[in-house]
Amino acid sequence: MSMARTRMGIALAAAGATAFIPLLMSGTAAEAAQPNLHRLHAAKAGSTDSTGQLSATLAGQGYLAINKENVLFPSIGVTPAGKAVMAFTVTGPDFHPSAGWAPLSLSSGTGPIYLAAPGQAAFDDFSAAKAYAGNGSARWGDYSAAVSDPAGNIWMGVEYISGVERTALSNWATFISHVTP
């Protein structure tokens, strides 16, 4: 299996394949200084026992961060050849919510961060409004996906602000793209 769908959690892989697992970290003072930091663990899947329990060994780990910006709700796609891409929303003082991605590698860690679609406006959503029981902070996320196809492409879907006229309740959209890592 080469598909991965995560919400700060687990990527799935078949025996012998690579799984990249993003986790939000906020334990140390250095990590807490980052607006939103993802620590990555890469595991080589070993085998499954008679109950279907998967065993794996840690093959590497690292971080994905943008200085003074946020990387939100990652999803990871892994090709049958083990090449991987992380898709996520980029936002912060210098970015309206944008669709971003970065290549992942066991040997070199994360590659450069790319914007697949820059956000066109600030987030404007009903979830922040007091009339809808909001507290002034709008809810964002849970909507990213990354999956490989048999040809070795990774298709990504990420939340961002497209600039299209807002609906009655929000102005976010989903950007669909693909790369060949």
Image: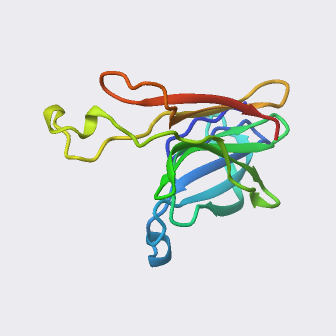
Give left or right: position of 35 versus 113: left
Q: Residue visible at 45% across and 36% down?
A: 142
Query: Against 48, is 1 above or below?
Result: above
Quarter of the image for the C terminus: give it.
Answer: top right
Q: Residue 54, percent across and down?
A: 65, 42
Q: Residue visible at 61% across and 49% down?
A: 21
Q: Residue furthest bottom?
A: 29
Give left or right: position of 179 versus 143: right
Quarter of the image for the N terminus: give it.
Answer: top right
Q: Residue 50, percent across and down?
A: 65, 34
Q: Is residue 7 visible?
A: yes
Q: Is residue 10 visible?
A: no
Quadrant of the rendered image containing residue 77: top right
Q: How many marks?
A: 0
Query: Against 45, is 58 above or below?
Result: below
Quadrant of the rendered image containing residue 150: top right
Q: Residue visible at 48% across and 62% down?
A: 25
The colour scheme applied to this rendered structure is rainbow
Q: Residue 41, percent across and down?
A: 64, 57
Q: Which residue occupies the foreground of this view, 142 or 131?
A: 131
Give left or right: position of 80 versus 165: right
Query: Against 121, is 66 above or below?
Result: below
